[in-house]
Amino acid sequence: MSRPRHDSEVLPAKDRLENAFWELLADRDYRKITVTDVVHEAGVNRNSFYYHFSSLPELADSAIMHQVEAIPINQAPDPSGDPEEQWRERVTALLSDPNQHRRLDRLALLAGPHSTVELGESLRDFARLQMISMLQKDPDNLDLKTDLMVEFSVGGMLSVLQRWPELSDTIELKDLLKEDVAVLAMGIYLAMSRENMLTYWNRIFAHTSQNRTPNKP
């Protein structure tokens, strides 16, 4: 018997099916999840499932894509603002928002023991496409510099997600805003922006050197 759905009278069937996918993935191996499991968990019928999706992999892709798109940290820095300050604001918002925390919990499942290589590749592909879209680039005609920056950024995100289960209950906002961590994180964050990276790093290191130079008598 499926568990009662608190959202069954509120959310559209497609959203309930995607939510069911995440609930089931947290509970069992992806290869053991069936369409029957999903419709029971979502509280819909099989016709509703096949109206929205042709298969379980298509449902998985849709669920992953929507979670990736909803993470606000993927937004590029505003070129007219201070990127360091924007980083702090977005990390603060991300960690203080229960909905965003849940999205990270869900995406971390794709790097967990219940996942598959295919699900991990879907996450990587959607994260990559999201960043390329944000940069307003053509994914089929990326220059080498942009391609490397995107790969660097996606790899950093996936590394965090792999460790998210052990970090989520212990990491604090101050940990992400410490100088050394912030510089590393900003490297990933600015890789998603249009700011000249050499100019950015020169500014960062000049600022750091000034702060660490002892005052002369």
Image: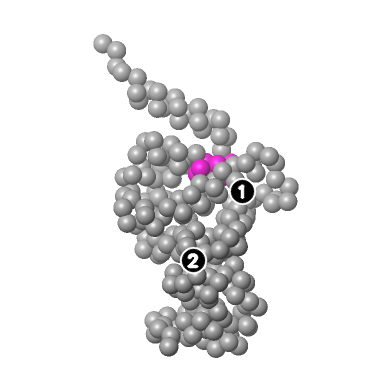
- Specify the quadrant of the image occupied by residue 196: top right
- Horizontally, residue 92 falls left or right of residue 116, namely left
Start and end of the magenta stretch? Answer: 188-194
* Nearer to the camera, 205 or 34: 34
Amino acid beneath label 1: Leu
Q: Label 1 belongs to which residue? A: 135
Q: Position of residue 168 (x, y in %)?
A: 36, 56
Query: Residue 193 lies in magenta, yes or no?
Result: yes
**Regarding mark 2 in the picture, which secondary structure is present there?**
loop
Q: Residues within 10 Å of mark 1 (few under 14, many from 20)?
A: some
Q: Which mark is residue 52?
A: none
Amino acid beneath label 2: His
* Nearer to the camera, 4 or 166: 166
Q: Label 2 belongs to which residue? A: 114
Marks 1 and 2, the one that precedes in the sequence: 2
Please tell me which residue is depicted at 51% across the width and 33% down the height of the picture. 200
Please tell me which residue is depicted at 59% across the width and 42% down the height of the picture. 149
Please tell me which residue is depicted at 55% across the width and 79% down the height of the picture. 34
State whether residue 197 is above or below residue 159: above
